[in-house]
Amino acid sequence: MMNAILGSRTNRREFICSAIAAAVAQDVPGVISAEGVPNALQQRLATDPQRPQIHFLPAANWMNDPNGPIYWKGSYHLFYQYDPQGAYWGDMHWGHAISADMVHWQHMPFALAPTPGGPDAAGCFTGSAIVDGDRVVALYTGVVNDGSGKPNSFGESQCLAYSLDPRLIQWTKLEKPVIASPPPDLNTTGFRDPSAWKQGDWYYMTVGSGIPKVGGAVLLYRSKDLEHWTYMHVLAQGPWPQIPPAFAESGDMWECPEFFALGGKHVLIYSAEAKVFWHCGKLDPETMRFRAEKHGVMDLGDYYAAKTQLDAEGRRVTWGWILEQRSEEKFRAAGWAGVMSLPRVLTLDLENELRMTFAPELQGLRQGARHLQVTADKQVLRKRLAGMSLDQGCAEILGSLRANESFELSLVSDEPQMQARLTFRYDAANRSVHLDQKTFTLDQARETFEFRVYVDGSVLEILIDQEVAYTKRFYYAGSHAPRMFVRLNGSPSSLLALTIWTLSPISSNRLTA
């Protein structure tokens, strides 16, 4: 998959064509590890304070969408879009990492690479993985290009590869696509990012698409054997009547659709307009028609292309691509781009609203808890907060506040001159949460609510009461992370508790494994 993020108003097909034309069929190293990175670059990346210490990312170069996360034979496997040539999008492979806990990762060889002359000669784009008996099957979008560089001069098809390997290192591709093209009676704006599941005796698969002057769409297919697919109908199409049209721009498409059962309902997620959207509703299992009842946005910030999996305990876990917000010139020079989000567990509440928590496995990284001694004296409280600085650029903050009082919290850094890196403001009268310039209205009145923040290199991930998420990139000058502090504006009685942990890095050198 390639999306509009790299040139938000550039025609997607034009962008993909121009990028593919410059990046087809090159010889590359097979392992995305520190051993495959030149020593000089490795040393620079290992000391780059912008690189996260607890988020997964490859040892170097470009990363985007998570692909086919899956739990298989006692291990978690995370695949992702990766360009082995450098810190830029182009020569799409499936990178691969393995973990015992979804937190600590080991780099593995490429799972999928373009095959010269094959249906994926110009790139192995986004897809999903599914367990099929004694094998894991990857369904992904293969891309070919006619070399002309003209708009619409490439083709997208859905391809299949499988692995019998317990560690999913060895893969076998089918020579031909399992779905060669979109339905002939549909005029589509794109055709990519398959996601498959089994329901009863059938396998089903969604494919992201769009219809000109109508909006994004999710196409539904079914199969008995994962290789021969029959198109059924459009599972979902936008703009939905209850959503402002800007959520699904006319003529655009929905990328990375995922459809899954959760809490007695079914949930559809998809990515469009630089956001991940969700719909919760009912699926008729006889007709396979979906009727949405609730909807929302999964994250207000720099979070895209979400993919989900079931973990060892049967929880629905989601991963997202955290985008760069610096210029291409800067991330090319840095030698890396893109970060994988922390794992989040999805649930539905009693009103069938989507809720998120960070995976509890992350709590194993905590070190040296510092608990704020809350006081009604504003000056004393500020002084105590100032003494709880975040000094290593890698920390977790957990706090609780009264919901009947308005307040403002800021996360500020001492370089340059106490700059606000995050502003969290709550308007009690309207139950509205303001995260920087993003606004969200809480669904229900409450007496208190909790906030959790992960600070990691150039990444912030925030969850407010499991209801609203906000992911942010922030950058700074210098060779070390600035000291950061929590600052409270308003009545000190609004703050009930605050704990800060330093977090143990998942690797010794910021290279992730």
Image (spheres, helix red, strand yellow):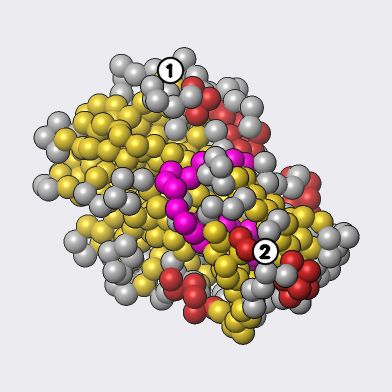
Which amino acid type is shown beneath numbered disc 1? Answer: Val
- For disc 2, the marked residue is 492
Magenta-colored stretch includes residue 232: no
What residue is rendered at 23% in x and 37% in y?
Answer: 282
Q: Which mark is residue 474?
A: none
Amino acid type, residue under disc 2 in the picture: Pro
Please state the horizontal and vertical placement of residue 324, each as a whole percent of the image. Answer: 67, 49
Asked where in the image residue 178 lies, by quadrant, the reply is top left
Q: Secondary structure at mark 1?
A: loop
Q: Which residues are magenta?
A: 438-465
For the point 34% across and 37% down, the residue is 294
Classify 149 as above or below 309. Answer: above
Q: Does the segment drawn in magenta span residue 449?
A: yes
Circle 1 residue:
214
| Residue in the foreground of this view, choosing between 352 and 381 | 381
Give the residue displayed 50% in from the left and 19% down from the top: 250
User: As drawn, which residue projects farthest toward the front?
Assistant: 376
Tell me whether circle 2 and circle 1 mark residues in contact (CB < 8 Å): no
Q: Quadrant of residue 504?
A: bottom right
Left or right of 135? Residue 447 is right
Q: Considering only order in the chain, which callout, 1 or 2, is on the residue closer to the N terminus?
A: 1
Mark 1 residue crowding within 10 angstroms, few (<14) / some (14–19) / many (20+) = some
Displayed quadrant of residue 186: top left
Q: Secondary structure at mark 2?
A: helix
- State the residue in front, 305 or 422: 422
Callout 2 crowding tier (Cα within 10 Å): few <14, some 14–19, many ≥20: some
Q: Position of residue 409 (x, y in %)?
A: 68, 57
Q: Is residue 197 visible?
A: no
